[in-house]
Image (cartoon, rainbow, N blue to C red):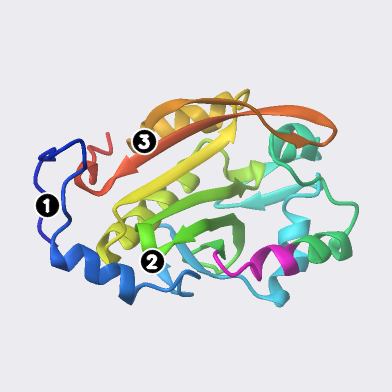
Amino acid sequence: MEPIAEPTWTNGLGPALPAEALAATRRLPDKPDGVVLDGARVRLRPVSTGDVEELFLISSGAPVARLGREVAAYDPDERIWRYMPIGPFADAAAFAAFLGPFSSQPDARTFVVEDRATGELLGSASLLASSAAHLKVEIGALWCTPAVQGCGVNLEACRLLLDHLFGLGYLRVEWKCHAGNERSRAAAVRLGFRFEGVQEQHSIQKGRRRDTAWFRILRDEWPVDPS
């Protein structure tokens, strides 16, 4: 798809979109397709019920080893779930009770992130609030096991998703996180997302007021220099 020209404002209205962009509003489903995306180290594929036990295991606080790295027992709230509206989970059944309805949302698609070489699971990522009519979607519910935190797994997974989404014809990809989640905010900026502001008292999360930081990246801003 050719880059969209700079906006030409007429009578206070935004620019008309080219026919090719508008065609994507009719072609894309609101629930993103379940595709498989391969990167250098990781693979994204749609989550299945058979993944629940391993996803729980690598996010439960038990010692875990992945990609040649190991961590001892850890606090799952501190390392993974603190800034997310869900988790930690007491057991695999509780994880499954969350994952089933979450992944079945009509405008969302959940993926597992796995080690491409071994098939071992590393974490999860989701596409949320997809709107084909407006050619926008959100990357969210993103986490990886502490064994691979800090080695670029989430960044590689997100770059695969961004390449895929903009290739399909989406014009805007959003990133929302708890305003206090400095790691998530830094990751968004590193990927090329631009900060749009904080929506105060956006929601109630785990009995606390949540302020939400909003970021976005537009198709004409991708790709960015990955350095």
Q: Which mark is residue 3?
A: 1
User: Is the residue 93 above or below the residue 206 in the image?
Assistant: below
Label located before the other in sequence (2 or 1): 1
Residue type for callout 3: Phe
Instruction: Count up the numbered dots.
Output: 3
Q: Picture coordinates of residue 82 (x, y %)?
A: 74, 34
The answer to whether residue 74 of the structure is visible from this angle is no
Q: Residue at x 19, y 45 (%)?
A: 220
Residue type for callout 2: Asp
Q: Which mark is residue 38?
A: 2
- The residue indicated by pointer 3 is 193
Q: Residue at x 36, y 72 (%)?
A: 28
**Where does the magenta region start and end?**
99-107
Residue type for callout 1: Pro
Horizontal side, residue 204 vs residue 225: left or right = right
Was residue 31 drawn as part of the magenta stretch in this picture?
A: no
In this view, the mark in front (2 or 1): 1
